[in-house]
Image (cartoon, rainbow, N blue to C red):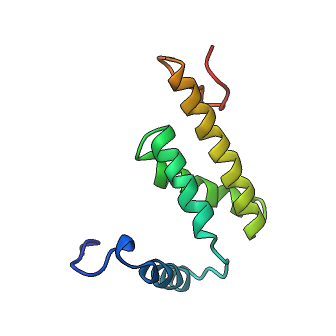
Amino acid sequence: MSLRGDGPRIGDDGRVLDEWIAAAKAELGIELEVDTTVLLDLARDAAHGVARPAAPLTTFLVGYAAAQSGGGPEEVRNAARKAAELAERWSAEAAKGSDTGPSAAGSPAG
């Protein structure tokens, strides 16, 4: 089974993204309204501020954290805000020339 196809891609038509989200929510049994702008902004921040593979991993972690906190849209926004702030700190520390980057706890390395 391949996830790649010859059909329209997300960048081709915003409608494709909306349809995909609706289908994925139905398949996974999720009734949450998804703020795609918040999640896509977070993915961009993680990809550019940390590393490209951080984008999907960070959005997964945000979803998990939101679920543990009650699972509503506000919990998603709060977790996304925290992760975006971490990505910003990470990027700023890297820009200062740190060889190690921020610690796993999220505070800048000294």
Q: Is 104 on the left-hand or right-hand side of 68?
A: left
Quadrant (top left, top right, bottom left, bottom right) of the C terminus: top right
Which residue occupies the extreme top position in the image? 110
Q: Position of residue 38 (x, y in %)?
A: 62, 61
Q: Is residue 94 above or below residue 14?
A: above
Q: Is residue 60 above or below residue 27?
A: above
Q: Position of residue 80 (x, y in %)?
A: 66, 54
Residue 5 shows up from this direction: yes
Q: Is residue 52 above or below residue 1?
A: above
At 58% across and 61% down in the image, what residue appears?
39
Residue 71 shows up from this direction: no
Q: Is 66 on the left-hand or right-hand side of 51?
A: right
Quadrant (top left, top right, bottom left, bottom right) of the N terminus: bottom left
Q: Quadrant of residue 92?
A: top right
Q: Nearer the viewer, residue 48 or 24?
A: 48
At 67% across and 78% down in the image, what residue appears?
33
At 70% across and 51% down in the image, what residue appears?
81
Q: Quadrant of residue 90?
A: top right
Q: Is 58 on the left-hand or right-hand side of 13?
A: right
